[in-house]
Amino acid sequence: MHGLPQLTSPFSPSRKGQNAASVVAATLLAALVSLLLLSSCGGGGGTTQGSTSGGPFSPTYTASAFHEDAVEGSMEAGVDTSCLEDGYVGAVGQSGSRLKFQVSKDGQSYNYDLPNDGTPIICPLNMGDGAYTFTVFQNTSESRYVALFTTSADVAMYNEAAPYLVPSFYCDYNEGSACVARARELTAGAQNQGDAVAAVYNYIVSNISYDSNKASQLADSAGYVPNPDATLASGTGICFDYSSLAAAMLRSVGIPCQIVTGNVSPNNVYHAWNMVYIDGTWQSVSVSVESNTWSRIDTTFAAGGASSFVGDGASYADRYVY
């Protein structure tokens, strides 16, 4: 996955009794195999083209927005439930203490750091349709929090992929973002969604390098939020940066993309990757994206040079989906 295999001829010119014709034939065969691998794998460096299928690609951009006039509660502790059908919820708060926003359903909860200066956030409805509870919490002491405002709602989204087509907390971008402009450039010639996924994947794998120092610094910390444009500008990042950038670029052209965090082999390394959903396929040496189902892509692992931080790509255990 980190490059093309080294091809060695089964014949060696130093072998006694080897005739020149056999040497030439073996050399030509090795060269032909190399060319075939290069054409199918995109020339190395972790990139891979393969074959794609599906209907015509028509990029679309879907925005998310916080609507102050629809806030339940107040701007000191409030929730915007006006876009539940579109797969997301908004929250806002103002306080001298730390704030959290919790999205809960069927006993499962996702907690987000909520800015205490009145800056709203957008969070995905990532647990499917059903009854949700939304709560703004304020920190009182150490790890203790008290609820400032809570509300509940029945969610029925227009599409189960809706949360993964818009900007949200861990995948923050807008129509003027550099990553959006780059995604449009990369997918301009795509014939189908498989082509578009391949173009974004190959770009990230070839142009973003793994930042081992950053990974070490953040190993024992919590609350890190990736910035897709910052990752694009620096050309470096950790697994969360890779997956956030991939999601931002794919979502911005209308391809549903999840950010997934969890554990990978060996040693249960905590990691982040993506799941994509397309109406066609992309099949290559190292990637298999099936039609009309969620398929995994791991740009960090494909980029190489980070095995101690991203595992070996043999097995994945999902924990959170954004």
Image: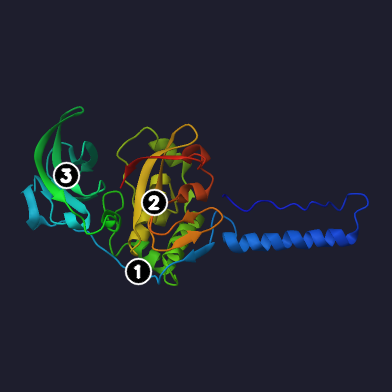
**What colouring style does the render use?**
rainbow
* Image location of residue 245, percent across then percent down: 38, 54
Mark 1 residue element: loop
User: Which label sits on residue 275?
Assistant: 2
What residue is at 40 percent from the left and 50 percent from the top?
274
Mark 1 closeness class: few <14, some 14–19, many ≥20 residues within 10 Å: some
Compared with 316, 40 (above or below) is below
What residue is at 18 percent from the left and 51 percent from the top?
89
Q: Is residue 246 left or right of residue 98?
A: right
Q: Earlier in the sequence, mark 1 or mark 2?
A: 1
* Image location of residue 17, percent across then percent down: 93, 52
* Image location of residue 275, percent across then percent down: 39, 51
Residue type indicated by callout 1: Pro
Could you tell me how far apart the alpha carbons at marks 3 and 1 are, in whole angstroms?
31 Å
Residue type indicated by callout 3: Tyr
User: Which label sits on residue 132?
Assistant: 3
* Image location of residue 136, percent across then percent down: 14, 41
Q: Is residue 313 left or right of residue 104?
A: right
Confirm whether residue 304 shows in the render: yes
Could you tell me how far apart the alpha carbons at marks 3 and 2 are, in whole angstroms?
24 Å
What residue is at 10 percent from the left and 47 percent from the top?
78
Are the residues at dot 3 and dot 2 in contact (C-beta closer than 8 Å)? no
User: Which label sits on residue 59?
Assistant: 1
Q: Earlier in the sequence, mark 3 or mark 1?
A: 1
Mark 2 residue element: strand
